[in-house]
Image (cartoon, grey):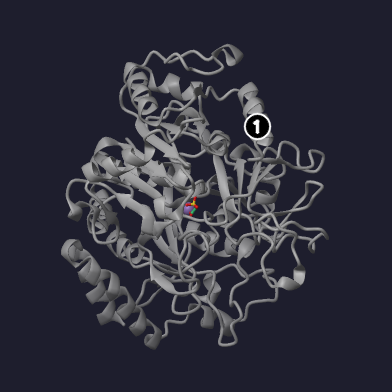
Amino acid sequence: MSKTFSSETFGQTLPSNKKLLAWVKEVVELTTPDQIFWCDGSEEEKEFLTKQAVDQKILIKLDQKKWPGCYYHHSNPNDVARVEQSTFICCERKEDAGPTNNWAAPKEMYDKLHGMLRGAMKGRTMYVIPYLMGPAGSPMTKVGVELTDSIYVVLNMRIMTRMGKVALKHLGENSDFNRGIHSVLDCDPARRFICHFPQDNAIISVGSGYGGNVLLGKKCLALRIGSALGRNEGWLAEHMLLLCLEDPEGKKTYVAAAFPSACGKTNFAMMIPPESFKGWKVTTVGDDIAWMKPGADGRLYAINPEAGYFGVVPGTNNKSNFNAMRSMECDTIFTNVARTPDGDVWWEGKDNSPPKDLIDWKGNSWNPESGEKAAHPNSRFTAPMKNNPDVAEEAEWPEGVPISAIVFGGRRANTMPLVFQAFNWIHGVYIGATVGSEMTAAAAGTLGQVRRDPMAMLPFCGYNMGKYFDHWLEMRRMIKVLPRIFHVNWFRKDSYGNFLWPGFGENMRVLQWIAERCQGRANGLETAIGWMPRYEDMNMNGIPGGMTPERFEALQKIDFEEWRRELILQDELFIKLYRDLPKELMCQRELLISRL
Ligand code: SAT
Ligand code: MN
């Protein structure tokens, strides 16, 4: 590899790992880049690449007084979200991908993608990004290497993962690493494919520059490939935030929670308890992904495989998410928010009203009367997790944190109460398997419509969803101290369309009940759908606007007509999965019907 670029500049030394070198050589021969850049993860490298990105107009430097170390990126307007119709699981048998995934035969897909990649990096630089998913030294950590022709990807990956030397060191001479190839090509939606090859531990992504499609460590490795690895190796890769709740006596409860994309996982993970919760503290272990494995003591341990946040920006302000605002104050990449010519940024739902002379996410000057949003609804910030003032020290623990509660939720205007608890693990798996949520902007689709999103994993499960439920059911034999399972809904509305629950920091009240249920301290009422807190079981002190027992009743109401519809909607998914649906789940459904 004589073309290895800038080895003098950064003292880049090629790794000795023969498998890695051979694979990089293979991809170089296929894609024929002009230069190859081995990323080491150093500060000098970051400076060098950032300058290049600015020179190439890929990044715009923001006002460094207001936004130190922060940069701005406009994506191609056709490339602003994940594309589920172009996302494929490529395994030998179609039934192993299951009815909820797009499937292609590996050989055919490799042929097609290799055809598209042939010569694709001519005139460009190929960056080699070795990275870790998980803290260095953790037995749960996995190594990936992403080969990409996008400098934007490199700069995001160095925030989102532990990247460079640290990953090569962890890998050593091992041949066990995820092989990821990414090329933006000409960013044509018709030539956009996000493909996963679980049996080869490989990913190929072409035609997109959007985070969820191209930061291959995130959804592709940590969830789609990860879920398939987890099934074989006896662990769970989940679309879950991880938080630590500390009570005034210093007792810590670790919670994992799954919500579909853009339902407020980041807000929940970074929650600040309200004034009235003196002595309580929430710290963030992770905001999007959890890898969970039974530990030697029989408890379920979780790590956050990521090192940064790739969060939705609109709606974020000092009130809705104080810690996210702090997290994006420095060393952050903003994508598709609005900006001003003098290097400030703005978005809908920020604390202030729009400054004049705003440039919208498409790069045009914005007219407030246009009715168009200045920031794209799925505009994002990429920020290092160490920027978060309330990041948990546990986020770096190689052994992970022992989980007491697993929470499922969705965005539902009706039917689903604020909170209830599953009777047991199997019932909890049923609750997770039947999660529904109104569609948001994180994925292309119809806004507002309820879709089934089992465990918030519908777009992220790398194998047959029915088998995935089986794996969840099987896990109960491997975990001696089973976490309790809950369902929450912050989004229930009254008949006038107003939210019944204040949400945000006030969700602390629900979290307190959950933690105390896990400790066997809080009371609950047995109902048809699970254990539910009564008004007097929850701490309502100092809740803004007050909470009357009547309002709480409306919030927790089990409306039989709505549940009848809910069960019919659940059927759509169950019928689709019928062939592989574990009979335990059918049985849970029957039990629920008879209780209702
Ligand atoms: O766009 S991402 O896939 O990275 C985020 C999400 O949808 O959860
Ligand atoms: Mn997500």
Quarter of the rendering containing residue 469: bottom left
Q: Position of residue 8 (x, y in %)?
A: 58, 11
Residue drawn at x 52%, y 54% is 79
Q: Is residue 565 left or right of residue 267?
A: left
Q: Secondary structure at mark 1?
A: helix
Instruction: Say if residue 527 shows up in the picture.
Output: yes
Q: Nearer the viewer, residue 169 or 372?
A: 372
| Residue occupied by mark 1 | 50
Q: Which corner quadrant holds the N terminus?
A: top left
How packed mark 1 is, by other alpha carbons closer than 10 Å (few <14, some 14-19, many 20 or more), is many
Q: Is residue 23 left or right of residue 329?
A: left
Q: Position of residue 503 (x, y in %)?
A: 60, 67
Q: Is residue 383 left or right of residue 150?
A: right
Q: Is residue 463 above or below residue 119?
A: below
Q: Is residue 231 left or right of residue 28?
A: left
Instruction: Say if residue 234 shows up in the picture.
Output: no
Residue drawn at x 33%, y 84% is 564
Q: Amino acid at mark 1?
A: Thr
Q: Nearer the viewer, residue 276 or 137?
A: 137
Q: Nearer the viewer, residue 165 or 400?
A: 165
Q: How many discs appear?
A: 1
Residue drawn at x 45%, y 25% is 167
> Is the CB atom of the residue marked by disc 1 within 8 angstroms of ligand 1's nearest atom?
no
Residue drawn at x 51%, y 49% is 210
Q: Position of residue 157 (x, y in %)?
A: 53, 36
